[in-house]
Image (cartoon, coloured by chain):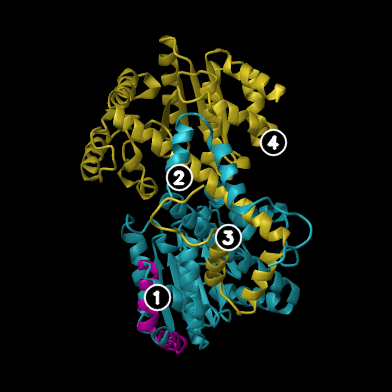
Chain colours: A yellow, B cyan
Amino acid sequence: MDKTLRVVEQIRRGEVRAAARLIRELDDGVPAARETLKHLYRHSGRAHIVGLTGSPGGGKSTLTDRLIRYLRQEGKTVGVIAVDPTSPFSGGAILGDRIRMQRHATDDGVFIRSLATRGHFGGLSASARAVITVLDAMGKDYILVETVGVGQDEVEIAATAYTTILVTVPGWGDDIQALKAGILEVADILVVNKADREGASRTYQELLQMLELRVPQGKMAWRPPVLLTQAKDNEGIEELLAAVRQHEAYLQGDASAFQAARVAKVRQEFLELLKEGVFRHLVEQLEADGRLAAIIQEILARRTDPYSASELLILELLGPVSQGAPRES
Amino acid sequence: MDKTLRVVEQIRRGEVRAAARLIRELDDGVPAARETLKHLYRHSGRAHIVGLTGSPGGGKSTLTDRLIRYLRQEGKTVGVIAVDPTSPFSGGAILGDRIRMQRHATDDGVFIRSLATRGHFGGLSASARAVITVLDAMGKDYILVETVGVGQDEVEIAATAYTTILVTVPGWGDDIQALKAGILEVADILVVNKADREGASRTYQELLQMLELRVPQGKMAWRPPVLLTQAKDNEGIEELLAAVRQHEAYLQGDASAFQAARVAKVRQEFLELLKEGVFRHLVEQLEADGRLAAIIQEILARRTDPYSASELLILELLGPVSQGAPRES
C-alpha cells in the first residue's frame, strides 16, 4: 500500500517516468498497477479530453501535432494517446507521423503514448481509458486521443472524449466504413483536412447535408461546425482550437448537458469493465468446476442447445430480473 | 408449442417459406422464433459449413456463385449466407453480385440469405450462427458463408465454418487489415482469385511464405493449399471444390481433429451467447433495482472507481472462483 501511494503521488506530481512505468505495467497486467490505477481514478476528471478520428491518411497525426504546439504556446499541458491497432503491421507512414510527434517528447509539458493492443482490459477502449486516467491524474490540461481507422473500436474510443473531432479529406463522401460505424453520430466538430485538394468544397457541402439528416442524440443544442484545415501548412488550426474551446465552454456552460455527458461516460466505462470482468470471471468459474465442459458435451450430443443452455445458466446464476421495487442490498 | 413443432417440421422438410419467415422473425427478436430455433438446433449438425472471407473486391460472390453451380450439378443442396455489414451504405457492386447469385433463387436446392445487422443476438456472428442452424436443419448439404470485409467480426464468422477459404487477389501482400484480424490463422484454403492479373505469382509466393511462418494452432496436420482461380472465367473452381472436399475428408478421417473442431465451435457458440446474455440480463437487473444509477453516482463523486466497483459487484454476484474440486450442482 505504501508503494502504491508513493507511485500515486509521483504521478500526481506529473513525474513522467513513474507514469510511463505504470502504463507499461497496466499493459502487462501487473495486479499492483491496477491498484494504483484505482487510486489515480479518484484524482482524475479534470482534463478536457479531445478525440480525433477518421480514415487513415487523413492527416490526423499532423493535426494532433499542430494542436499540441498551439496548446503549449498557451502554456497548457498536453497528454496524447495514439491508438493504432494496425501498428504491428503498418509501414513507414504511420511510424513517420509518430516520430514527427516525438519532437514534443523533450517537452516536459507533453506526454505521448501509443497503444496498439487490447491489453489486459479486454478491449482497446478499456486500455485507452486506463491511460487517459493516468494522464488526467498527472494533471494534463488537455488529453488528445487520436485513433487510426474508423472501425467500431475506434469510434468507441473517440466517443470517450468530451469533444470528438472527425477528420475527413476531400472525397470522403465515399467512406463507407466510417458511416457504418456511426461516426457522424459521435462527432462534435467535423474537419475537412487537406482542404487545398480538389473536391474540398464538395465534401464540405456533403458533410453539412449529412449533419442536417443526423438523428439528434441528446446533443441537440450543439450544432457541430464543419471546418477546413491544411494541417501541413498550419492553416485553420487556430479556428479548430477555437471550436474545441467553444465546445468545452458549451459543455461547462450548460450544467445539465455536461452532467449528462459525464454520466454517459462513466456509465459506458463501468459497463465495459463489467462486461469483460463478468465474462472472464464466469468462464474461469465454469472451467474450474467442470461445468463448461459438461455443457459443451450436452450440446454436442444435441440433448440441449446453446440458446437454452445459456438462458438456463444465466437464470441459475443471476436469478430473474425483478421489475418494480428496488432490491434491498 | 404445437405451432412451434409444426414450424420445426416444415423447416426440416426444407420448406423455403417457413425458413424465410423464421429468419425474419429471429431478426425481429420474436420470442417464439427463438423457441423454434432451439428445437431446430437439435436437428442440426449435418451440413458441411464453408466460410469465404477476404477484402471487398476480391470476387468472393462470383466464386460463391461458381461453387453453388458445381455443387448443384452434383446434386448437392446448398445454403448461402452473405454477411455484409456495410450493405445499407454500399452501392451497386455488392448489390450486383447479390443479384447475380439470385439467379439460383428459382432453384429449390439453393437457399440464399443476406445478413446485414447485428440483430437481436448482439453480434453479427451470433446472428449468422442462427441462420446457419436454420439452413442446417433444412437439410442443406453445404452451407456457404460469405463475408464482405476482413474486420474482427468477419474473421470470427469465417472461423465458425469447418472449412474456411481466404480469398485474395494479386497484390494482396499489402492488406494490413486482414493480417491484423488474424485471418491467416483461421484459413484452411487460400485462393488467389483474378489470377490473370499482374502480380498473381508474387502474391502466391508471399502467401506460401506467410503460411510457413504461421503459428500452428491445433490444425498442424492440415497444410493449407494455395490455389489460383479466375472465378469470372470459371477457372480453378473444380480444384477449389476438390480442396474443400479434401479438407472435409481430412476432418472426417481424423476423428480427434474433427471432434476438436466441433468442441471448439460449440464452445465459441455457447460462450458468445453467454457473454451477451449475461451482460444484457445483468444490465436489466441493475437498472431495475436502481443499483446501476447508484454506482454511477458513487463513481462520479470519486468515492469509488469503475475498476473497484466492477470487481466488487462481480464478486457479490458470482462469488470467488473456487479452484480445485468441482462444485456440486
Share a chain, discs 1 and 4?
no
Q: Are marks 3 and 4 in contact (CB under 8 Å)?
A: no
Identify the residue at image location x=63%, y=24%: A20
Q: Quadrant of residue B46?
A: bottom right
Q: CA distance from mark 3 to mark 2?
A: 19 Å
What residue is disc 4 on? A31
What residue is disc 1 on? B32
Q: Please, what is the three-letter code of the amino acid marked with disc 1?
A: Ala
Q: Chain of mark 4?
A: A
The extreme right residue here reads B324
What residue is disc 2 on? B292
Left or right placement of residue A245 versus residue B253 in this view: left
SS assignment at label 1: helix
Q: Are marks 2 and 1 in contact (CB under 8 Å)?
A: no
Q: Which residues are magenta?
A: B5-28
Q: Mark 3 against mark 4, which lies toward the viewer?
A: 3
What residue is disc 3 on? A317
SS assignment at label 2: helix
Residue A191: mark: none
